[in-house]
Image: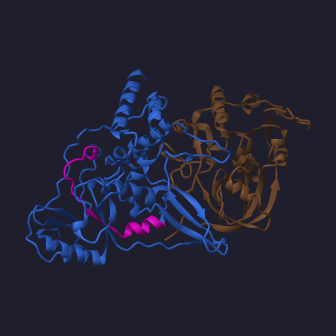
Amino acid sequence: MENIYTAAAATVLDITAHTDTERSFRLATDIQASPGQFVMVSLPHAGEAPIAISEIGATDISITVRNVGKVTSGLFRLRPGDRLFVRGPYGVGFPLDLFEGGRLLVIAGGSGLAAVKPLVEHYLQTSRLHRLKQLDVLVGFRSPKHVLFKDHLKHWARDCGVVVTVDTTEDETESWAGGIGFVVSYIKTVGNIGPGTSAVLTGPPLMMGNAVKELVRHQVQEDRIWLSFERHMKCGVGKCGHCRIRDKYVCVDGPVFSYVEARELID
Amino acid sequence: MMKTLRLDNEQAENAFRAIADDYTVVAPKRCAGRGRFSDTDLTTYETVESLGEIEFSAKTYFSAKSVLLPIREVMFSFNRGEAEEVRTSMPPTIVFLRACDIHALAVLDAMFLEHGGREDCYYARRRENMICFLLECPGPFDECFCVSMGTSRTKDYAVFIRPEAEGYAAEIMDDRFERYFPFGDRAHVAPRFSEEDPIPVALPRHVEASLFADASWKEYSQRCIACGRCNTSCPTCTCFTVQDIPAADDRDSPTRQRIWSSCQVKDFSLLAGNHDFRLAHGDKMRYRVLHKITDFAKTFGLPMCVGCGRCDIVCPEYISMRKCIETINTICRRGAEVG
């Protein structure tokens, strides 16, 4: 009988430090994921945690984590060549079919960018550029020193709309050329938002709530707004119960939900 | 072929002993002095060797779910850098259950065999080796509402045994057990099921959005102490958490274990970075109760609650599930009229 909880060992290929507390780990694995899915990452002794896939390669995936918990602080002690355990991919990713041929607006807050990065990169591949009429990425961080994936954002700006904002530039010595203020207030700066726009949101719940209101005000249809949820999970496969909201399990029914479903998910 | 019979005490004990030689038998047992209050007994599920040990007339404090879901179990170990499954096995086990608790198995099966599209191997292996014997109810207990929940009757058992004034009556539904009863008078024997609840309960048909912000949950926040007894005693609560435990003799080979969890207890939903959901005890209660009466049913087509009433019995604050369902109904009715 198949065991759904055991994981395979994977080698850390390289590690990228974004900020003092945020790093990406590229892992050698045969996991074939679709944008929006996640993996369960574990370290013996520290435990296991659900982590969004931030890059999908042919023979590797990347995860991007903030050093805030038991598992993540264990990850921060790893060096290239070390091994960890990974299983997946899990969850339902973004509905790529529904986006094709239309305009797509991706809005991310902070480390939420990691979860939508594979989606943006999916459409920025040369062979797929024509599949969207328009692609815009709106991403907000706390301050300039919290900005993740700086090089990627710069690179993306050649082929799609990219707006990077920070909540504040206080206590910053380096100059800031991007926007200032909450990311939601920049939605109105994106052109052509309307009934033909699909929107994808990740980030803090308050930000996602405000972004939905603003999008609806711009006539974006509620069933075209997609949110990626983050919840505590112990299994990733619909058994442990921790990520349940009403009749939905974030691990198997999500983590991506349309707003029409999401608005019923009251905690 | 079904077989029914009456047995005298000696015949019944002999038959039972023969069964107990081939199977582990788990049944309600009265454990003297182990009750919650001083000088009270605890009726709970234990392994039994004779019919005489079985407590037929009292309701158990805990359900029998720990037979299928041990409170703590080792799932696998990290051995020399590989995750190695710990093969668990349960000998063929007979469990004496009331109708409601037999219905509860359908809920456990739905979670562990169906949900997410994949089977939980630890549960599945035990479930294959579990056989139900039916316990008849002496009439509804005070807290029961199985008739309202549609769980008062069942045909899903191998053998039914009832103690009588003289000896026992039995109904053998599963052919495998006929050979243990090579005697008897083929009397008419059929289990009697509860016909009426002491206080009937109706489930809300539609949950109004107004329910979530209702002040009643604040009132429950004042009473509920979030101890999680309602979860541990419930025959259909299945949530678990996972821990890595270092092996005593080998620090490099920890085992990954799972342990019962509770949606009422602190940190059930805590995210890394300290973001949490449903901090108020009343909100946690709403989360549990709505799962039991509506949310689970939306996915699986049957309510999760089987109306056994154990959560009412174990609650240190005397919070009643029936009363809570009634409160939900009142709020939803009000919401429907306004909305």
Asked whether B139 falls inside the magenta stretch, the response is yes
Tell me residue A136's x, y (percent): 75, 39
Q: Is residue B85 left or right of residue B214?
A: right
Q: Which residues are magenta?
A: B121-146
Position of B153 relative to B256 (above/below): above
Q: How many marks?
A: 0
Q: Is residue B237 left or right of residue B267?
A: left
Give the image's coloring scheme: by chain
The answer to whether residue A207 is seen in the rendering is: yes
Position of B122 relative to B143 (above/below): below
Q: Is residue B176 left or right of residue A21?
A: left
Q: Nearer the viewer, residue B71 or A101?
A: B71
Residue A77 figure quarter: bottom right
Q: Nearer the viewer, residue A230 or A61?
A: A230
Q: Residue at x 66, y 48 (%)?
A: B272
Q: Is residue B170 left or right of residue B250?
A: left
Tell me residue A197's x, y (percent): 66, 35
Chain B shade: blue
The answer to whether residue B204 is seen in the rendering is: no
Q: Residue at x 35, y 59 (%)?
A: B64
Tell me residue B339's x, y (percent): 43, 23
Asked whether A202 falls inside the magenta stretch, the response is no
Q: Residue at x 27, y 43 (%)?
A: B148
Q: Residue at x 65, y 58 (%)?
A: A33
Q: Nearer the viewer, residue A181 or B90?
A: B90
Tell me residue A37's x, y (percent): 63, 53
Chain A shade: brown
Query: Residue reaching furthest top?
Result: B338
